[in-house]
Structure formats: structure tokens, C-alpha cells
Image: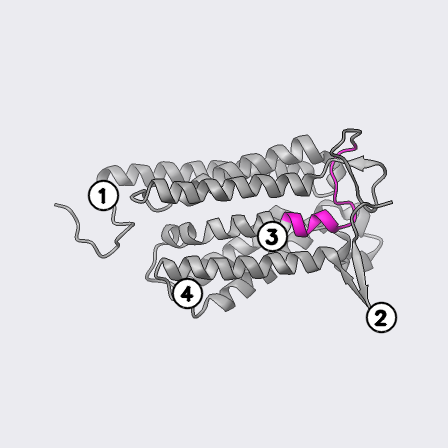
């Protein structure tokens, strides 16, 4: 029997805990991201449309990626394609579709800002939202656990036999630590180059997500295990490339990331 409820009832209505938890996490992330952008002096008027577009693209990409990497499971049962309350959202599929949408909308609605400055303001909020989403989302879905375990920390999950490694809780803790680390970086290095926060987040999150898939989930995750590991490595490499580029540019140009209106130094 599952130790975590996957749904609850209000009269004749059935609410799936997985989706309800993700909705809470998305709303908290939205408020926090808007606050960070406003603090960084961005115009937040179009941010509601921006966030909605990213959420839709992320959910669609995550679902399509899960279906594509588990085609044998979905091919004969089209009704399963929309049954997201049973789980089945591949993280990197969501990123893959949301990323180009976000890049396009950033250039459309904030053309005067550099992409690196925009992502530095946004990424810590995304990490915080992801941390909350792991705890409130996959923790309460069908097949939400990792490998079978007999250790004390194992939890029973619906649709899985035996006690499982509580991967959603572990990932929530990992992402929370990363979020705190990014805030510390902002506090301790106020004169850092723009793009550093984004690059560090990409490196650490990519490596950790890849290792989680390799060590805690593997093929039992039904989410394209090898693809997730490769995508995590690619994300980390992209973050490293961003850091190298930004730090290289910093040697030859003045850094006005804290005060973009400051005059250039001769």
C-alpha cells in the first residue's frame, strides 16, 4: 500500500495530489521570480504572459519527451498520453521546449537587456520552484520512487512494489541547497560578472540531475534514463562554456553588471 496519497476527494470531485502540488510550486515560483526581476529593475508587466507561456511549453515538452522515450508503454494506449496525474513528465523534455520559447519571448519583451542579466535574475527562482515542485509533485504521484530499498528511509509509493528510495525528497533537498548556494554567491560576490549565477546553476544542476538518474533512478524511472544522463552532462558543459566566455570577456571589458548605467573606465 502506498505511504503517500496520490489523490483526495472533495465531494464528488477528485483532485490528484501530484498536479495540485505542482500548481502550488509554480505559483510560488512565479511570485518569487517576479519579485527578483522587479528588484533587478526589469519591467514585470509582461511577466505573467511570459511565465504562462513557459509553463505550457514546459508541460508539453516534458510529456512529449516521456511519451517518446517510453513508446512501448504508450503506443497501444492513447488514453495514457494525457494521464499526467499518473506521472510521466521528463524534466529535460520540458526544458528543451521551454528554452527556445523563453529565449524568443525574452528578446521580444525585454530587448534592451542582455540575456545573461535576465537569466541571472530568473534562474535562482526557477531552482527554488523546482525544489518545491519535487517535494509537492513527484512525491505524490504513481511510480514516484526510485530503486527498491530495505533501508530505514525507504517509502512506499503507489504503483511500485516494496519500499523505494525517496528520490523526489532527495532532489528537493539538493535543489534547495543549490538555491541557497546561488543566493550566497549573489551576496558574497556583488561585483560578479553577469552570467556567473546562471553558469554555476547550469553546471551543478546538470551534474546532480545526471547522477541522480544514474544512481537513484536508472531504467526504473521510465523516463529515458540514458537520455536524461546525457542531457544533464550537456547542460553542465553549456554552463561551463558560459562561465568561460563571461570570465574571458571580463578580462578585456569593464564590468558594469551591478550598475549598468555606470560610465566605462578608460
The crowd level at tag 2 (other Cα within 10 Å; few <14, some 14-19, many 20+) is few
Q: CA distance from mark 1 to mark 4?
A: 27 Å
**In x, y percent, where is residue 87?**
74, 51
Specify whether residue 6 is in view: yes
Whether residue 65 appears in magenta in the rendering, the answer is: no
Q: Identify the residue shown where x is 65% and y is 52%.
A: 62
Magenta stretch bounds: 134-148
Q: Which residue is under mark 3? A: 94
Q: CA distance from mark 1 to mark 3?
A: 35 Å
Specify whether residue 231 is in view: no
Q: Which residue is under mark 4? A: 108
Main SS, magenta region, reads loop
Q: Identify the residue shown where x is 50% and y is 37%.
A: 204
Q: CA distance from mark 3 to mark 2?
A: 32 Å
**In x, y percent, where is residue 201?**
47, 42
Say which label, 4 or 3, has the lower sequence index.
3
7 left or right, relative to 208: right
- The part of the image, by quadrant, that contains residue 215 is top right
**In x, y percent, where is residue 100?**
50, 55
Q: Are marks 1 and 4 in contact (CB under 8 Å)?
A: no
Say which label, 3 or 2, has the lower sequence index.
2
Q: Which residue is under mark 1? A: 253
Q: Are marks 2 and 4 in contact (CB under 8 Å)?
A: no
Q: Are marks 1 and 2 in contact (CB under 8 Å)?
A: no
Q: Nearer the viewer, residue 154 or 248?
A: 154
Q: CA distance from mark 4 to mark 3?
A: 21 Å
Q: Is disc 4 placed on a helix, strand or loop?
A: helix
Amino acid at each position: 500500500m502506498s505511504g503517500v496519497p496520490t489523490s483526495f476527494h472533495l465531494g464528488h470531485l477528485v483532485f490528484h495530489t501530484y498536479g495540485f502540488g505542482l500548481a502550488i510550486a509554480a505559483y510560488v515560483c512565479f511570485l518569487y521570480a517576479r519579485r527578483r526581476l522587479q528588484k533587478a529593475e526589469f519591467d514585470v508587466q509582461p511577466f505573467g504572459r511570459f511565465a504562462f507561456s513557459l509553463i505550457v511549453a514546459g508541460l508539453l515538452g516534458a510529456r512529449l519527451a516521456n511519451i517518446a522515450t517510453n513508446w512501448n508503454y504508450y503506443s497501444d494506449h492513447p488514453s495514457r498520453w494525457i494521464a499526467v496525474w499518473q506521472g510521466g513528465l521528463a524534466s529535460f523534455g520540458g526544458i528543451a521546449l521551454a528554452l527556445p520559447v523563453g529565449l524568443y519571448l525574452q528578446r521580444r519583451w525585454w530587448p534592451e537587456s542582455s540575456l545573461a542579466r535576465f537569466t541571472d535574475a530568473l534562474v535562482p527562482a526557477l531552482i527554488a520552484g523546482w525544489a518545491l515542485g519535487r517535494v509537492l509533485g513527484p512525491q505524490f504521484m504513481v511510480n514516484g520512487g526510485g530503486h527498491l530499498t530495505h533501508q530505514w528511509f525507504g517509502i512506499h509509493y503507489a504503483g511500485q512494489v516494496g519500499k523505494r528510495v525517496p528520490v523526489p525528497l532527495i532532489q528537493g533537498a539538493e535543489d534547495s541547497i543549490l538555491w541557497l548556494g546561488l543566493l550566497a554567491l549573489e551576496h558574497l560576490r556583488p561585483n560578479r560578472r553577469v552570467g556567473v549565477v546562471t553558469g554555476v546553476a547550469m553546471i551543478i544542476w546538470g551534474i546532480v540531475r545526471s547522477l541522480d538518474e544514474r544512481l537513484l533512478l536508472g531504467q526504473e524511472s521510465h523516463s529515458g534514463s540514458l537520455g536524461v544522463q546525457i542531457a544533464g552532462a550537456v547542460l553542465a558543459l553549456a554552463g561551463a562554456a558560459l562561465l568561460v566566455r563571461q570570465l574571458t570577456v571580463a578580462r578585456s571589458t569593464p564590468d558594469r553588471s551591478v550598475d549598468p548605467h555606470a560610465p566605462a573606465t578608460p
